[in-house]
Amino acid sequence: MDWKLELVVVPVTDQDRAKAFYTEEAGFDLVVDHRAGEFRVVQVTPPGSACSIALMRNSEAAGSVQGLHLVVPDIDAARATLVERGVAVSDLFHFEDGNQVPGADPQRGDYNTFCSFADPDGTGWMVQEVGRVKSAHR
């Protein structure tokens, strides 16, 4: 039996502001924006992802989710896209001997080059490079 993670709830203070950030700045796809009285579900999905996030109003817990990972094959291109879209994203960094070091992993090994950003409520996202195609000139 397959167990698939398809939805993660991210608490936000303002669903409209969060929806605008994720769709207009981060470039996520809007999947659902449904209201039933006072209840509203806003669901967005990172491009190419099988897992979506639900932006649920919960002011007390907003910003409490940290360390969500987006995995990309080309972190340079991913970071450039975020910057172009107006997202405040960190410079690239990697880890050596358990310490965070500026710049990409010199070997560009999987799982060791990152950048990070946060939504307007402080939800923390990591972008991680996995599956980079190494060209002959590197």
Image (cartoon, helix red, strand yellow):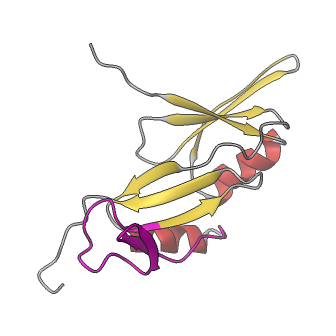
In the rendered view, tell whether residue 3 sits above or below residue 16: above
Numbered label tally: 0
Name the residue at 66% across, 70% down. Answer: 88
* Residue 80: in magenta span: no
**Figure quadrant of the N terminus:** top left
Q: Where is residue 65 in the image (x, y as percent from the top left)?
A: 65, 43
Q: Residue furthest right?
A: 38
Left or right of 98 in this view: 28: right
Q: Which of 2 and 35 is in front in this view?
A: 2
Which region shows up in magenta?
Answer: 87-114
- Magenta span main SS: loop
Q: Nearer the viewer, residue 87 or 121?
A: 121
Name the residue at 81% across, 33% down. Answer: 58
**Figure quadrant of the C terminus:** bottom left
Q: Position of residue 63 (x, y in %)?
A: 73, 47
Q: Which of 19 and 90 is in front in this view?
A: 90
Q: Residue furthest front?
A: 97
Q: Residue furthest bottom?
A: 137
* Residue 107: in magenta span: yes
Q: Where is residue 3 in the image (x, y as percent from the top left)?
A: 35, 20
Name the residue at 81% across, 43% down. Answer: 16
Name the residue at 80% across, 33% down. Answer: 57
Q: Which of 59 and 43 is in front in this view?
A: 59
Q: Where is residue 64 in the image (x, y as percent from the top left)?
A: 71, 43
Q: Which residue lies furthest to the top in this view?
A: 1
Left or right of 107 in this view: 75: right
